[in-house]
Amino acid sequence: MASWVDVLRKERKRIDRLIRKEARKKPRYVKPQWLRDADAERTRTQFPWMLELKARRKRLRQAQEKQANGTKKV
């Protein structure tokens, strides 16, 4: 028979696991909309080349997805 220490330890582990599971569900910090807008505006004005990179990556990803979808056999 398990000692009461082992029982408590097992129960503690179970509770810790549940707490971690719940913590994963909680939303992370989300910037307020005005702050996101301000960041986007700063990016547009100070780093226009970043927008070009982002657009290029998006086009490349879309082309790859289109190609992958074209080769799939049903």
Image (tube, grey):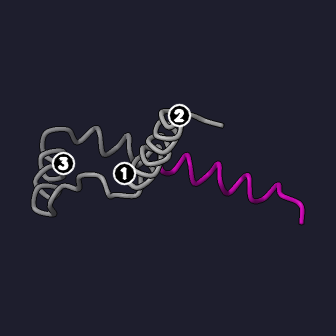
Helix, strand or loop under label 1 = helix
Residue 32's mark?
A: none
Pair 3/1: label in front: 1
Residue 30 figure quarter: bottom left
Vertical arrangement, residue 59 with respect to residue 34, above or below: above
Vertical arrangement, residue 40 with respect to residue 3, above or below: below
Give the percent coordinates (x, y) of residue 27: 32, 58
Q: Amino acid at mark 2?
A: Asp
Q: Is residue 40 left or right of residue 68?
A: left
* Residue corresponding to mark 3: 44
- Identify the magenta region: 58-74
Q: Is residue 53 left or right of residue 59?
A: left
Pair 1/2: label in front: 2
Helix, strand or loop under label 3 = helix
Question: Which circle's residue, 1 or 2, is located before the other in the chain?
Answer: 2
Q: Amino acid at mark 3?
A: Arg
| Few, some or many residues within 10 Å of mark 2 (<14, 14–19, 20+) | few
What is the spatial separation of the Cα atoms under label 1 and label 2, in whole angstroms? 26 Å
For this rendering, which residue is in front, 25 or 73? 25
Residue 30 in magenta stretch: no
| Few, some or many residues within 10 Å of mark 3 (<14, 14–19, 20+) | few
* Residue corresponding to mark 2: 6
User: Residue at image x 18%, y 48%?
Assistant: 44
* Residue corresponding to mark 1: 23
Q: Amino acid at mark 1?
A: Ala
Residue 1 figure quarter: top right
Helix, strand or loop under label 2 = helix
* Contact check, label 3 and label 1, Cβ < 8 Å: no
User: Residue at image x 23%, y 42%?
Assistant: 48
